[in-house]
């Protein structure tokens, strides 16, 4: 039987694959610590849970319009006005089944066969597959030599007659880099000058520990006409399982996204939408507590990593990841395990010490590994102890 070339080209999500492997080892009784998933380990805030319960009691359990309930779109509009000083009407906002669904739908909205999207790397594992599924091609821009920040020169080199968009993510997954305002504005101006869509994934915008997160429309209001913002409740409000994300953009763009959504998902879960209203309207103090906890964990993990041999790790300014350069381990062995790249590093660490990390190869950055510090202090301490032992035993 036939399968499409798209699905045959597609690889399973690396982060989910590592997580599944860790779960399997745990089921076998192995003491695995998985620092692989980008998921807050906190409970969903009480205002969100209570809003969901009240919605169910009111019978809010049926279809909604494809762009989402008016109450949630209004809450998102109010949030952006208060946080960034930018104005969006509910008609310029659509609610999706997570930010991942929003990004997938955006690519279906803008790409024809052979179109290109400029994608600075390291980058989240699913971006390129979203582009490929829409018939496009990701034009990779390696930022490993520019402090994980895309420069105008790099963007210009990647530009071609088929380029239709630039896709950026800040705070960045996997590096934790927070783009300074001059970089954000430069990207926005580049897109305006070349008549490109700017797809701006800011799902981690609340998780910033030094400096500030900047929104392109906030810095350059005229770029609102060609910018699509992507956000959601998963990371800021510890609501990954509720699956609510949203996109903000020109009304015409959002209406075309809604056509696709109507044929695929109809709408995001009605109860989850009401829970998201509760989170945005009432869980600000919960967010602040989580951010402070993540900052403390980041400081602990980076301090521990800085004293380990063979590796290098920068201090990330946002998100909840540390991107570690492990190239100093290449050519070394742990027992029978030869480390030749980031994949074999992760395999050896899991096999020997039961610590699961994600190889940088999955993020278009071979030679690195991603550590998620969205875990308890006890787990992080034990994982660091094991990793330090592993590195010290390499020969």
Image (tube, rainbow, N blue to C red):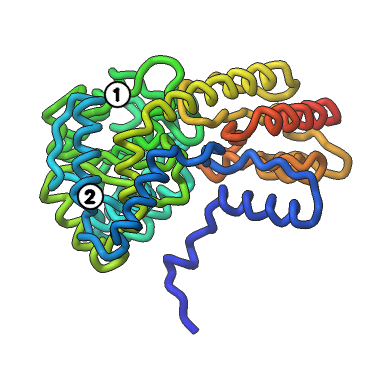
Foreground residue among 292 and 187: 292
Residue 168 seen in the current view: no
Count numbered badges in the picture.
2
- Locate residue 144, reporting x and y percent: 49, 28
Foreground residue among 214 and 122: 214
In the image, which disc is placed on residue 222?
A: none
Q: Which residue is mark 1?
A: 214
- Locate residue 82, reporting x and y percent: 22, 26
Disc 1 element? loop
Q: Is residue 137 above or below residue 323?
A: below
Residue 294 seen in the current view: yes
| Residue at x 41%, y 34% (from the top left corner) | 236
Foreground residue among 36 and 69: 69
Q: Is residue 51 left or right of residue 238?
A: left
Q: Is residue 52 above or below residue 303?
A: below
| Residue at x 37%, y 23% (from the top left corner) | 179
Q: Which residue is mark 2?
A: 94
Q: Is residue 265 above or below residue 42?
A: below
Where, by quadrant of the figure, is residue 268 drawn? bottom left
Q: Is residue 328 above or below residue 115?
A: above
| Residue at x 60%, y 42% (from the top left corner) | 36
Disc 2 element? strand
Q: CA distance from mark 2 to mark 1?
A: 21 Å
């Amino acid at each position: 039987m036939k399968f499409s070339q798209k699905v045959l080209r597609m690889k399973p999500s690396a982060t989910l694959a590592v997580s599944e492997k860790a779960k399997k080892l745990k089921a076998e009784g192995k003491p695995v610590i998985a620092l692989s998933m980008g998921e807050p380990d906190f409970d969903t805030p009480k205002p969100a849970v209570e809003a969901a319960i009240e919605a169910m009691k009111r019978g809010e359990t049926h279809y909604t319009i494809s762009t989402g309930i008016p109450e949630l779109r209004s809450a998102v509009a109010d949030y952006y006005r208060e946080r960034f000083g930018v104005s969006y009407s509910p008609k310029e906002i659509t609610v999706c089944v997570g930010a991942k669904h929003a990004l997938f739908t955006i690519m279906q909205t803008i790409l024809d066969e052979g179109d290109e999207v400029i994608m600075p790397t390291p980058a989240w594992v699913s971006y390129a597959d979203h582009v490929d599924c829409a018939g496009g091609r990701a034009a990779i821009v390696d930022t490993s030599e520019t402090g994980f920040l895309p420069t105008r020169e790099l963007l210009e080199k990647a530009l071609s007659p088929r380029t239709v968009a630039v896709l950026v993510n800040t705070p960045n997954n996997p590096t934790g880099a927070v783009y300074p305002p001059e970089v954000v504005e430069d990207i926005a101006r580049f897109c305006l000058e070349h008549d490109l869509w700017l797809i701006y994934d800011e799902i981690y915008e609340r998780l910033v520990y030094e400096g500030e997160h900047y929104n392109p429309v906030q810095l350059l209001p005229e770029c609102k006409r060609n910018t699509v913002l992507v956000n959601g409740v998963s990371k800021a409000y510890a609501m990954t399982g509720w699956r609510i994300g949203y996109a903000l953009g020109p009304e015409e763009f959002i209406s075309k996204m809604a056509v696709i959504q109507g044929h695929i998902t109809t709408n995001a879960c009605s109860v989850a939408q009401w829970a998201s209203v509760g989170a945005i309207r009432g869980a600000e103090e919960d967010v602040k507590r989580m951010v402070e906890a993540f900052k403390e964990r980041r400081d602990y993990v980076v301090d521990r990593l800085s004293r380990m041999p063979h590796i290098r790790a920068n201090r990330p300014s946002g998100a909840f990841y540390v991107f570690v350069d492990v190239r100093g381990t290449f050519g070394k062995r742990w027992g029978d395990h030869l480390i030749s790249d980031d994949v074999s590093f992760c395999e050896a660490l899991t096999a020997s010490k039961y610590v699961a990390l994600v190889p940088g190869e999955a993020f278009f950055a071979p030679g690195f590994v991603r550590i998620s510090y969205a875990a308890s202090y006890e787990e992080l301490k034990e994982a660091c102890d094991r990793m330090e032992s592993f590195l010290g035993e390499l020969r």
